[in-house]
Image (cartoon, rainbow, N blue to C red):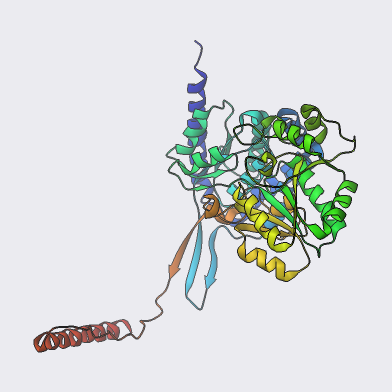
Amino acid sequence: MELDRDLCSLQEVRNLVRAARKAQETLMNFTQEQVDKIIDMMREAGEANAARLAMMAVSETGMGNYNDKCFKNYFASRTLYDYIKPMKTVGIIREDHDKKLWEIAEPVGVIAGIIPTTNPTSTVIYKAMIALKARNAIVFSPHPSAVRCTNEAAKIMHQAAVAAGAPEGAIGCIMNLSMGATNELMKHPSVAMILATGGSALVKAAYSSGKPALGVGPGNVPAFVERSADLAKAAEYIIMGKTFDNGTICASEQAIVAEECIADDLITHLKRQGAHFLDPEEVVKVSKVVMLANGGVNPKVVGKEPKFIAQLAGINIPDQTKCLIAPLSGVGPQWPLSYEKLTTVLGFYRVADWHEGCDRCFQLLEAGGVGHSLSMHCNNVEIIREFALKKPVNRLLINTPAAMGGVGATTGLAPSFTLGCGTWAGSSVSENVTPLHLLNIKRVAWHLGIPDRKPVEPMTSGGCNERAQTQVDVQLVQEIIKQVMQHLNK
């Protein structure tokens, strides 16, 4: 008898969640030492398989490049491990002796992990490690274009965790994928939380599931270059950030906004770094192949090299080109390349001064990146302060490649592949997600004493009888409070 594929996928989800629920009931009783041993073994497995998983991801998805995906997998293993290793996630994690408070960590339960096609293996390593660090089990839903490599990453993490003492089923992944299966996972009664990384529609579905969800919004990251910047370094970092894994990180630069007085010099440095500036006719051709007519980036060009995009657009570019740059004069539908482009294409704007630059950056953010990130190349602290106070972003990245700075590789931000965008973008979290976001915190609070308060005599507009009654009422309340305080302070 031939089994229905959709029914098989739904049954697989239910089996995975059932196993995860059973595993989580065991995990919740683990000590900090047991948890940390598991995380260390997972770190070791992630490092050991970083190259193989990178090759699988590039081969299956056709996105990004091998070297950078190797780095992503290593970053999600070693760098993340070093950051979360000292975290207390079991038992009493904080004591405040002055306020007489204890804070006690508890796992949230089974987590649904939604995985994007742009980072199909590194996101699995990252989410598996932060989930188990907080004593949660996790079940992954891969992107349809990355089922094999995502499942392999989940398998490696699961085997390492079990070898270190974790229960079977603590990490699961859907193999028979369907939209129904993903919806079943997100809405399953035994799933406590959704950790969603992916397109806007999928993240909205996570927030609409009725479950607590940690999701992210799109990034349309402007890179503002102010006159005080080191232009050579700015050009190097912008190209480095934009071309990292062929632009597949949501924190990667999407448009350069340069002050007019330094724009020409910056262009010279950008060209030295491998940028090819498009002429007006080429901008039109590239726009048509990079962006869809109804909005959004063309999936065919996501994570692709400039040569592929140029061939698709029918233009000629130098062989050594690392990035295509399109000079633009506005933001919106008339300028399709002003929106987020998860590939090796940048917009370029000239502005009179930092005030106009501030406005242009705001327009770009409003076009699709509000709440996410903004990059600045600037050595004027006062201008940086102005941007920080006024821009609706949760990551202002200074003098660093935005793609790496946003995920915490070149900055002091928490290492993460889930970058919260706050309420500006409809997200429930505004920072880089860590194991601490996957905990319930119980609090034990001791009595500190009763504040010395006197009731305020109410004002009345009545006659003498009403005022007399009010005085009696106030005296009665004062007597009651006096008796209660004497009793509590014995």
Query: Horizontal placement of 187 versus 370: left or right?
Result: left
Query: Horizontal placement of 102 versus 227: left or right?
Result: left
The image position of residue 436, as x and y in percent, is 57, 57
Q: How many marks?
A: 0
The image position of residue 468, as x and y in percent, is 12, 89
The single residue placed furthest to the top in the displayed view is 1
Residue at 67% across / 55% down in the picture? 361
Q: Is residue 487 visible?
A: yes
Quarter of the image for the C terminus: give it: bottom left
The single residue placed furthest to the left in the displayed view is 465
Query: Horizontal placement of 475 versus 343: left or right?
Result: left
User: Which of the 4 image quadrants contains residue 382?
Assistant: bottom right
Camera-nearest residue between 52 and 374:
374
Residue at 66% across / 63% down in the picture? 387
User: Which of the 4 image quadrants contains residue 460?
Assistant: bottom left
The image position of residue 330, as x and y in percent, is 68, 47
Camera-nearest residue between 12 and 471:
471
Q: Is residue 433 visible?
A: no
Seen in the picture, residue 476 relative to 273 is either above or below; the reply is below
User: Which of the 4 image quadrants contains residue 117?
Assistant: top right
Seen in the picture, residue 192 relative to 141 is either above or below; the reply is below
Camera-nearest residue between 221 and 287:
287
Residue at 80% across / 36% down in the picture? 66
Camera-nearest residue between 114 and 456:
456
The image position of residue 83, as x and y in percent, is 69, 57
